[in-house]
Image (cartoon, rainbow, N blue to C red):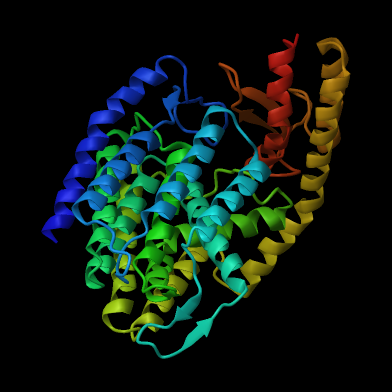
Amino acid sequence: MIRACWFFVLGWIVSVFFIPWMFKVSRRGIGLDDPNETRKRQEVPVSRLGGLPIVLALLVGMAINWWTAPIALDSKAAVDWAPLLVGSLLMYGLGLWDDLKPLGAKKKLVGQIIAASVVYYMGLTIDRITYPGARWSVELGQMSFFVTVFWLIAVPNLVNLIDGFDGLAGGIGLLMSMTLGLVAIHNAQLEVAGYAFTMAGALLGFLVFNFPPAKIYLGDGGAYLIGFTIAALSLSSSNKASVAAPMLVTVIALGIPILDTTFALLRRALRGYPIFGADDEHFHHRLEHLGLTKERILFTFYAIAVVFSLLGLSVIWSQGRSLPVAISAVFVLALFALRFFHQIGTWEDLRRKADRVFGRRREVRYALLQAQLLELELDRCRSGDEFWPIFDTALRRVGFTQEGEAIDEIKIQIRYNGSSPWTLHASKAQANLSEWQRLAECFRPVYARAKAKWTKT
């Protein structure tokens, strides 16, 4: 345990020392996150290079781990650092690339699959799943590749999806790193524990600058790095080729991100939006809309994450006997989210909600189609005078109006790549403000491109 504490301090020192250097890099306009979308809460550009000091801390921790405990080829407990090193660098590099020059969801997914496949063929695999206490065991056979790759890309994306709120992803990653470090200590894998606590210390140092109001963000690179490290450590802290308990601990401890992501994917799919698109309806966004301060929201999530981490650890300590309790806790949290965030307490509430969602689905699909056509028109039109009338006609087809036309008019403001928000008008009788904002977001990318290409007069 003393060794783990030293690695924790090491990670903290490296992170705190190098993060100020990221500010100097960002002052040159490199890796800045601009407040160019409505869902973004910051008022000024913020650096997205917070993952780089964490990478450096992990590399230092890995080197010291290897130097102080050389790998013994005949030892079953030895750690193969190569897959961890290569996977971490590949995942971070992919995310950093997207931070500097957006790649798009499909290209990022392909890159993640390639990175996870490389790690699989380097030897970090899930070949057999054994229930805690060895009550049953399943050989995966040819499914090993698909299960391993899915695991190694699912956890990074879970972390990335919750990285939309100051201090949230870093805090969850900190708790997960410490949890997996304790699992490794329980299994007498001191090298794995040292690596896990190195990341925990680095994330604590990062939170010094990321706690609201954040001065630096993880970016996709940092989020992918944290997620991959968590996924890889859950396999490294298992017995060779046999995993279950550490993966169960990870799944349970990640209860909040898993539920948040599940609700987000279902919400977007049912409404007709791209499931990998972004929105501002995550758990933390909804609590913020209710008036809670960022600090209260963070500490609420931290408290829940601590409870789930302890429940996950109890699965190992009890040899699987506490698993039903942990599953019940996740189920209760899901019911609470449905009741509190979506106002669904009865089957009648669910039916009314479904009717309204499916009733608006056709309008959403139509708006997305109009936005796609406008993207083509943007490339075809030779001037703004030719494009903007077409753009205004498409907005009218969806239902937006000119100012003063609707009696029960509402104003919709959308942030884009500009100093002032884009203002639209619509009838409140046809839809509420949130629904109009979601429709307007369908047109935001093409509007931003057109404004950059031509100045609307």
Q: Is residue 378 left or right of residue 74?
A: right
Where residue 133 sits: x, y (%)? 35, 87
Q: Residue at x 46, y 41 (%)?
A: 92
Where residue 191 sits: x, y (%)? 25, 59
| 131 or 374: nearer the viewer | 131
Q: Is residue 405 left or right of residue 252?
A: right
| 340 or 77: nearer the viewer | 77
Q: Does the rendering let one see residue 35?
A: yes
Q: Is residue 444 left or right of residue 202?
A: right
Where residue 205 sits: x, y (%)? 25, 39
Where residue 306 sits: x, y (%)? 29, 62
Outermost residue, left side: 2
| 303 or 235: nearer the viewer | 235
Q: Is residue 22 left or right of residue 343?
A: left
**Where is the N terminus found, in terms of image quarters?**
bottom left
Outermost residue, bottom side: 135
**Where is the C terminus found, in terms of image quarters?**
top right
Q: Residue at x 70, y 16 (%)?
A: 451
Instruction: Tell me if residue 456 comes above or below residue 67 in the rendering.
Output: above
Q: Residue 403: which quarter of the image?
A: top right
Q: Does the rendering let one see residue 289?
A: no
Q: Residue 277: which quarter of the image?
A: top right
Q: Residue at x 70, y 34 (%)?
A: 440
Q: Residue at x 81, y 35 (%)?
A: 372
